[in-house]
Image: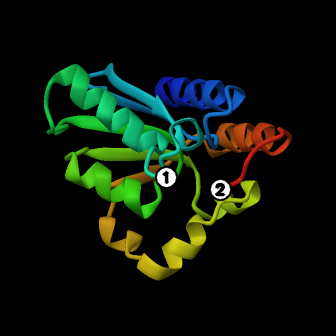
Amino acid sequence: MNRFMKIAIEEARDGIKKGHGGPFGTVIVKNGEIVGIGHNKVLLKNDPTCHGEVSAIRDACKNLNTYDLTGCELYTTGEPCHMCLCACMWANIDKVYYGCTVKDNEIIGFRDEKFNKIFGGREKLGNFLECIDRDECLELFDEYNKMNKTIY
C-alpha cells in the first residue's frame, strides 16, 4: 500500500470515529513530504464544502504560505466530487490519487454519482486522476457502514 494513502486512511478513520463526517481523508505531498492533511468535517463545522480534499488544501496552503500548490500531489480515500476536483485544479495540484470510486460512494449512502451524471467530463482529465489502493479504502468504507452515523 502507498504510504501516503495509508496516512489518508488513518486521517479518515480518525474523523469518522469523532463523528466529523464521511470516511474521506486526504494528504497533500510536495517533494516527498506531507505539506497538508485533512478529513471530512462537514458535520463538525456544519459546512457542506468542508470535504477532506478542501480541508487538506486549506492546510497545505496555510503551511506553505501560498495559494498555489504547483508541484503537489493529493492522496484521498475517495474519488473527488466535482467540487473537490475543481478545487484541486484551482490549487494547481499536479496529480490526484484516490482509493474508492464515485460509484463506490453509493455503498456508504453518498450521492456523488448523481452529480457525476450531471457534470461528467472526467474522461477529459487524462491521467490527472489515478485509482490506487481501492481494496484498503473499501475496508474503510465498510467500517463506516457499520457505524452509527449521520448521512448527509
Foreground residue among 18 and 72: 18
The answer to whether residue 130 is left or right of residue 78 is left
Evaluate if marks 1 and 2 touch, with contact meaning CB atoms under 8 Å apart: yes
Which residue is labeled 1 in the image? Answer: 48
Residue drawn 38% across the image and 33% down it: 56
Looking at the picture, how far across and down is residue 14, in whole percent? 63, 24
Q: Earlier in the sequence, mark 1 or mark 2?
A: 1
Looking at the picture, how far across and down is residue 45, in whole percent? 50, 38
Q: Is the residue 122 above or below the residue 147 in the image? A: below
The answer to whether residue 78 is left or right of residue 105 is left
Which residue is labeled 2 in the image? Answer: 152
Instruction: Indicate the secondary structure of the residue bearing disc 1.
Output: loop
Foreground residue among 47 and 11: 47
Q: CA distance from mark 1 to mark 2?
A: 9 Å
Looking at the picture, how far across and down is residue 36, in whole percent? 34, 26
Outermost residue on the front side: it is 46
Q: Type of residue at label 2?
A: Tyr
Looking at the picture, how far across and down is residue 108, in whole percent? 74, 54
The answer to whether residue 64 is left or right of residue 113 is left
Image quadrant in which the C terminus is located: bottom right
